[in-house]
Image (cartoon, rainbow, N blue to C red):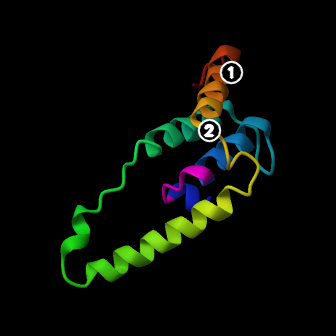
Amino acid sequence: LQAAEAGVASAMSAVALAYEHGVGVEESAAKAAKWYRAVLGASGGGRDEAGDCARGERAEGAEREAWRDEAEEEARRLAGGDMSEYDVLSALARLYEAGDGDL
């Protein structure tokens, strides 16, 4: 969850799948949809590296980037962590089609 909250797309899709199917968490279509939408937002790039230009921030930026890369690799090993954009859109469509009013 920490990696998903930090914006790691593979972790977000794994969390979404867990909520969709109630794996390790209480099943929640609303939370699953929230995370699937977050994956779609994250897959557009979304990384703002403009702030890394100041002195001393480059090393911190490199550490953050290394952590994100490692977290992304680990999350891909989780169920749902390797979902393609098509898979995410399909899962989101299924949730909307099921018609949970909280979406």
Dominant secondary structure (helix, strand or loop) of the stretch shown in magenta: loop
Instruction: State whether residue 68 is above or below residue 43.
Output: below
Front position in the image: 101 or 34: 34
Numbered range of the magenta stretch: 6-10
Q: Earlier in the sequence, mark 1 or mark 2?
A: 2
Question: In which quarter of the view is residue 55 placed?
Answer: bottom left
Q: Which residue is labeled 2 in the image? A: 84
Question: In which quarter of the view is residue 32 placed?
Answer: top right
Measured from the top left, where is residue 83 in percent x and y?
66, 41
Q: What residue do we see at 62% from left, 21% from top?
A: 93
Could you say which disc has been placed on residue 65 in the image? none
Front position in the image: 21 or 44: 44
Q: Which residue type carries mark 1?
A: Arg
Measured from the top left, where is residue 14 in percent x and y?
68, 48
Labels 1 and 2 touching (C-beta < 8 A): no
Q: What residue do we see at 53% from left, 56% from top?
A: 8
Instruction: State whether residue 68 is above or below residue 63.
Output: above
Q: Which residue is labeled 1 in the image? A: 94
Measured from the top left, where is residue 67 in percent x and y?
51, 72
Which element type, helix, strand or loop, lies under badge 2? loop
Instruction: State whether residue 7 is above or below residue 95.
Output: below
Which element type, helix, strand or loop, lies under badge 1? helix
Q: What residue do we see at 23% from left, 66% from top?
A: 51
Compared across the picture, whether 87 is left or right of 79 comes to left
